[in-house]
Amino acid sequence: MAALALAHQDAGWEVTGSDTKEAQITDEPLKARGIQVVEKFTPRNIWTLKKMVWVPAIDKLIYTGAHHGAQNVEVKWAASRGVPTLNYARAAGEFFADKKQICVCGVGGKTTTSAMIATILNETVQDPSWIVGTSEIASLPAAGRRGQGEWAVIEGDEYVADPAADKTPKFMYLNPKIVVCTNISYDHPDVYKSEEEVAAVYTKLFEKTLRNGGKVLLSEQAAEVIEGRRKKEEGRGGKEMIVYDEVDKGIYRNLEEFRVEIKKVLKVPGEYNVRNAMAAAAAAKEVGVSEKDILAGLSQYRGAKRRFEFIGEIREIGGIGGISLYDDYAHHPTEIRALATAAKEKFPGKKIIFVFQPHTFSRTKALFSEFGDSLRMADEVVMYPIFASAREEKDESVSSQMLAEEIKRRGGKAVSVTDGRKLVEYLTRTAKPDEIIFTVGAGNLYEFHQSILEGFKRISQGAAGG
């Protein structure tokens, strides 16, 4: 929503918004652009008094599927007075309908891959547009932009546009020329019953793209889920789906050689980011960007907010190694495995601690065993209470304490804390030199970063004083 707001401002719209009072990572970028956000939902935010009559003060209202979606009080009031109201997915599709769209989708990697493609195009193609699902991207001026050029990179999502009123998968409102799919896994159990249902939704997007003469670029994993094979398959309409990370596809002069070159220029860690970069390169290649310019663009990419993001460190404690704090948005078992692997590759020999906050009761319950198996890859896990979605009720049959026990049952080390104060106290009491701590999840753990760093500073001062 924030990225789309910024893109509308680029197009000359005056933009304001309403939200709940909780702090969000998008607050600062909106504030920096002068976009006012009112911390309450009420028709008073969108009406004005003319000739003693309250009339709409807006020309369009775009709403999220959260906060009651189409039943939100502002949406209902605007719709009743003839103001066009659109959910986010429909609004994004219409706003970029005049562009050649690159839709990046998948459970894991889509934000990074979208940001990488946008970075490459911003370095090499005239004035592109993009919508990326984060607040800040180091290599780009903003997470959302409306340019004058013909290409638009849009992060797509299989989740429904509005759980209460519109079950259309969000990415089906797009009409892409290129689809990049990084991964297909069972997610969002509140709207899908199985991986088969998820695969069927992705298949519809791919077939729609192929019928319209577009290209579909898949990872091997996505191809296996959709087609049950590792090799490319003929899609409907006579167009092929390309598996972008197989050597024998002939997209590049020599794919393995190109992968090595990407590793040399890439500034973000992890083999999974190499795969994301390969996906970005495949999309840029379809746009017509040369391999030389693809590598130059990727060399500029320095990460996105909440993706293996370095927060801070205490360099030295008692004359020996310090403690570093990182943050990552990983909230699905597949993403957690990739993060744990990347962390161990980047910090060999160091203890990796995950502070994990599960996102939604439904996802935690449906993927309980998978979470236990992926989290045990960290050397220690500190479980924080589940971050409930605005679209769900609390479920007493699942909890972070239960997940901590599952991690231990699978051979991992885990504890649980009940609130932010106890989290900071635990980390301050137990943290030791040469440890790498990650706050992990799609919730609000980032709110405690400053307190955690202050706790580490007290450890350092105490060691120095001793």
Image (cartoon, helix red, strand yellow):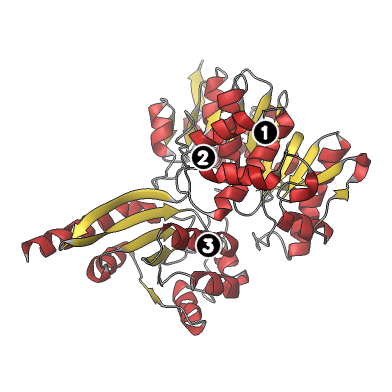
Q: Which residue is mark 1?
A: 284
Marks 3 and 2 sit apart, C-alpha to C-alpha, by 25 Å
Q: Amino acid at mark 1?
A: Ala
Q: Note whether residue 56 is visible.
A: no
Q: x, y (%) of residue 299?
A: 51, 36
Badge nearest the viewer, 3 or 1: 1
Tell me the quarter of the image containing the C terminus.
Answer: bottom left
Q: Residue placed farthest to the bottom in the image? A: 409
The secondary element bearing badge 2 is classed as helix
| Image marks 1 and 2: residues in contact by CB distance under 8 Å | no
Q: Which residue is mark 3?
A: 336
Assess disc 2: are there few (<14), some (14-19) or many (≥20) residues with their C-alpha within 10 Å of its C-alpha: some
The secondary element bearing badge 1 is classed as helix
Marks 1 and 2 sit apart, C-alpha to C-alpha, by 16 Å
Q: Amino acid at mark 3?
A: Ile
Q: How many marks?
A: 3
Q: Quadrant of residue 231?
A: bottom right
Q: x, y (%) of residue 434?
A: 29, 63
